[in-house]
Each structure stands twice: as structure tokens, then as C-alpha cells.
Image (cartoon, helix red, strand yellow):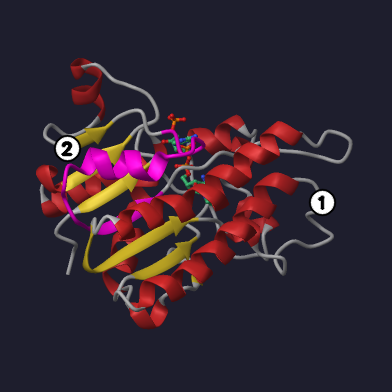
Amino acid sequence: MPPQTALIVGASKGLGLALVKKYSDLIGVTNVYATIRGYMDDKEKSSTFPQGVHVIEDIDVSEEGVGDKIVEGLQGAAVGLVVYVSGILKPEEMGKANWKDEIAMYTICAIAPVFVVQSLLMSSSLAPEAKIILLTSEAGSITLRTQGEGGGMYGHHGSKAAGNMVGHLLSYDLKERGVSIAMIHPGFLKTEMTKDAGMEEFYDKMGDMLLGTRLTAVTPEEASGPFVEFAEKLNIDMSGKFWAPSE
Ligand SMILES: NC(=O)c1ccc[n+]([C@@H]2O[C@H](COP(=O)([O-])OP(=O)(O)OC[C@H]3O[C@@H](n4cnc5c(N)ncnc54)[C@H](OP(=O)(O)O)[C@@H]3O)[C@@H](O)[C@H]2O)c1
């Protein structure tokens, strides 16, 4: 069964925006809450989101207090599904590691989720048997990083691994409340994130590069289908684990 209400954190574009549209169709616009980092005027809101979605502005997950701000934006609603999508990818290589970029990536991927979940839980903003999904990445898997792919990407891959651990730990705190949490890899997506990182040339070649599997890039809209199916299946026995629903 789809959730009665959904909160998408990091909904301005990419997968987050695709999920807002998908859940708006599935459960109705007034049951969808979408956070964005900045502000949008009415015209921009209506050209970005389906009319009627609750847009919660000024939610920068790299800022302390973000969890309480999200709770405030929910205005008393209790959500059945929380999807934490916010993420950044700043490529690094040996000799060019970047301190500030690493702090930003770890903060967004592995620190903020703790505070967002904590605020939602402590304020009773999670519906009974709510589900939480953190978008991490298979980039956080130590086993999948091989000599062939080499090193670099310290902050991105390291923060995704940390995000997986944080979600695992949260699962123990959430279990007694009947809330499940999963960390997922959404697939290789044709979004600004991968484009800005210069990965566009791999959109059709990734299958050859990664374990010889069927991994080619998909649009966020294509990825949102398997995502929704996974979210419906997620239950307390699956909680605390990392999943790749589209592979
Ligand atoms: N793309 C892939 O192939 C891929 C693969 C594995 C995992 N993932 C993960 O899946 C998620 C979605 O990826 P995507 O490709 O859809 O990325 P995207 O198109 O770049 O969108 C990223 C989203 O995160 C938001 N965000 C960034 N910094 C933020 C901050 N400080 N506070 C609040 N929101 C912030 C962005 O908002 P602004 O518009 O304000 O920047 C945007 O809404 C990410 O966590 C990513 O790491 C993606």
C-alpha cells in the first residue's frame, strides 16, 4: 500500500522532483511535502511542482537545526514515508582532495540524516509504521571499489559509506516505534549531479565498466517506478540494510 503522506527532502530537481510528481499522482498532491533549499515565487513553484504540493522552503540540510525546521514546515502533519534525497557529488583525486567539499558531503549524507530523523521522531511527526528511505549509493561499498576503478572520490564514497552506517544504527532506535529505514542505491541517473561531475559520457557505457552488468543510466522518472515498488515492500524485517531496487 502506498503511504498516506510523503515527505521528500531535497525535491528541487533530479530524483527528488521525480518522486514528488510520482507520489502526487499516487496519493494526491495535498499529501506530499517537498523541501527545497532556497525560495521560489508562486510562478516558479507552479512550473516546478504539481499544483497543491506543500513546498517547505529554506531547508538546507548542511545547517544545524534543519530537523526542527522541517518539523515546523510540516505544521503538525505526521508522515508515513520520508525520503531523504539531498546529496552532492564533488569529485576528488589524489593531490586535489578538498577539505571544504569533504565536510559538505559528510554533513549532507551522514550527519544531517541523524538530526532530521531525530527531530521527526521526537516531535511525533512520523505516522505509525512509517518508512524512511535514505538515498545513499553503492559508491559507499568497499567491495565494489576495485583497483580498476582506482582511488579518489574520498569524500563522496566515504560519506555514502558513513550514510549507510548511520541508517543502520538508526534502524535500532526506530525499531521499537515500528518505523523501518532503508538505504538505497537508485541506479545510475541522468541528472545534474552526474552531468556536472562529467559522467554524461558514461550514460551508455557504464554497463561495460561496472562488473559487466546491465547498468546503464536511467532518467529520474524511470528510477521512480522501482523506487515506489521498493518503498511499498519495505518492512521492519528489511530495516537497517542497504538495497539496490533497480538492479
Ligand atoms: N545520480 C546518480 O547516478 C546517483 C547514484 C547513486 C546515488 N545517488 C544519490 O541520489 C540522490 C539524488 O541524486 P540526483 O542525481 O537526483 O541529484 P541532483 O539532481 O543533483 O539533486 C540533488 C538534490 O539535493 C539537493 N541538495 C543539495 N545540497 C543540499 C543542501 N545542502 N540542502 C538541501 N538540499 C540539498 C539539491 O537541491 P538544490 O537544487 O538546491 O541544489 C537537489 O534537490 C543523491 O543523494 C545522490 O547522491 C545518485
Residue 136 forms part of the magenta stretch: no
Question: In the image, which is nearer the foreground, mark 2 or mark 1?
Answer: 2
Number of numbered discs visible in the structure rendering: 2
In this rendering, is residue 163 above or below 28? below
Local packing at callout 2 (Cα closer than 10 Å; few below 14, some 14-19, many 20+) is some
Task: Name the one closer to the observer, 189 or 181.
Answer: 181
Quarter holding residue 56: top left
The residue under label 2 is 53
Residue 66 forms part of the magenta stretch: yes
In the structure shown, which secondary structural element does the residue marked by tag 2 occupy? loop
Task: Name the one closer to the observer, 222 or 71.
Answer: 71
Going by the image, does 192 lie left or right of 20? right
Task: Name the one closer to the observer, 21 or 116.
Answer: 116
Q: Which amino acid does label 2 sit on?
A: Val
Give me the disc on residue 112.
Answer: none
Quarter holding residue 148: bottom right
In this rendering, is residue 133 above or below 44? below
Going by the image, does 174 lie left or right of 113? left
Farthest residue in the front direction? Answer: 122
Farthest residue in the right direction? Answer: 95
The residue under label 1 is 151
Q: Does label 2 point to a residue whose CB lies under 8 Å from ligand 1?
A: no
Q: Which residue is drawn at 87% across and 41% down?
A: 94
Region in magenta: 60-84
Q: Which residue is drawn at 13% across and 31% down?
A: 51
Asked whether the viewer can see residue 214, the reply is no
Question: What separation in Å lies between label 2 and label 1 (alpha carbons)?
Answer: 42 Å
Task: Name the one closer to the observer, 155 or 121.
Answer: 121
Quadrant containing the N terminus in the rendered view: bottom left
Q: Residue at x 28, y 45 (%)?
A: 71
Farthest residue in the bottom direction? Answer: 237
Going by the image, does 187 lie left or right of 197? left
